[in-house]
Image (tube, helix red, strand yellow):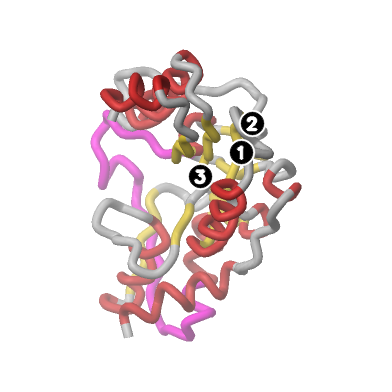
């Protein structure tokens, strides 16, 4: 809530802000110091990235002591598939309907990070001021995968006899929506204090427990 910013500034309260990898747009090996890519306001999904980026700017302009976390596809048990979160949605559909739907050609890249890896990195940042007033990517660069590869990995990991089908992105989403075709993090800064540990197959197995 932006109404809190003057109070945080007045009392110099250390603030950890969960931003998003959405601010990078369509880019891979994203570094914290590189240029960002925000698309046209005619494509509504960019509104989320703009909101996150504006809060980053406000934290700096108010001179609030802060750490900005740009999160890359953090997922795990109890994440809801309701709003299109790709990992739990694919797993739920595979378990419940025997089918996984891929929107587009499946070549979109994502890099998935288990929620416990985020929490463990947060513990370090909360307890120390080593990265004060910096931006840090939080993700797992070893879990980079295309969406089509992910669908087949879910099928294989869960040993399910399911159908994988592709449909055009705009058959499901309006013309005011746009998919991100590539997204993966550079986490060299994160690795200075924490290395993500949980592999993609383990993430799939962890989420799937909810649907047993």
Compare residues 116 and 165 and report the one nearer the observer.
116
**Tag 2: Cα neighbours inside 10 Å, few (<14), some, or many (≥20)?**
many
Q: Which mark is residue 71?
A: 3
Q: Position of residue 158 (x, y in %)?
A: 47, 82
Q: Position of residue 179 (x, y in %)?
A: 41, 39
Q: Secondary structure at mark 2?
A: loop
Q: Kindly report the distance in space between the C-alpha atoms of the residues bearing marks 3 and 2.
A: 11 Å
Q: Which residue is mark 2?
A: 32
Q: Secondary structure at mark 3?
A: strand
Between tags 1 and 2, which lies in front? 1
Residue, x 45% and y 23% (percent of image)? 59
**Tag 1: Cα neighbours inside 10 Å, few (<14), some, or many (≥20)?**
many
Q: Position of residue 154 (x, y in %)?
A: 48, 73
Q: Kindly report the distance in space between the C-alpha atoms of the residues bearing marks 1 and 3.
A: 9 Å
The first of marks 3 and 2 along the sequence is 2
Is there CB contact under 8 Å for labels 1 and 2? yes
Q: Which residue is mark 1?
A: 136
The first of marks 1 and 2 along the sequence is 2
């Amino acid at each position: 809530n932006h109404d809190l910013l003057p109070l945080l500034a007045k009392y110099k309260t250390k603030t950890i802000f969960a931003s998003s990898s959405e601010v990078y747009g369509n880019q891979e090996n994203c570094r914290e110091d590189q240029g960002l890519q925000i698309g046209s306001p005619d494509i509504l999904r960019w509104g989320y990235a703009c909101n996150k980026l504006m809060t980053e700017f406000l934290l700096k302009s108010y001179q609030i002591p802060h750490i900005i976390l740009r999160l890359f596809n953090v997922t795990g048990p109890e994440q809801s598939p309701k709003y299109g979160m790709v990992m739990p949605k694919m797993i739920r559909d595979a378990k419940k309907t025997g089918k996984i739907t891929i929107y587009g050609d499946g070549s979109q890249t994502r890099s998935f990070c288990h929620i416990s890896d985020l929490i463990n990195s947060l513990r370090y940042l909360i307890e120390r001021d080593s990265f004060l007033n910096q931006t840090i990517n939080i993700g797992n660069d070893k879990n980079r995968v295309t969406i089509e590869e992910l669908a087949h990995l879910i099928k294989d990991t869960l040993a399910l006899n399911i159908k994988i089908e592709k449909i055009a992105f705009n058959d499901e989403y309006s013309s005011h929506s746009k998919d991100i075709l590539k997204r993966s993090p550079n986490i060299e800064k994160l690795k200075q204090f924490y290395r993500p540990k949980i592999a993609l197959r383990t993430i799939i197995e962890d989420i799937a427990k909810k649907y047993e």
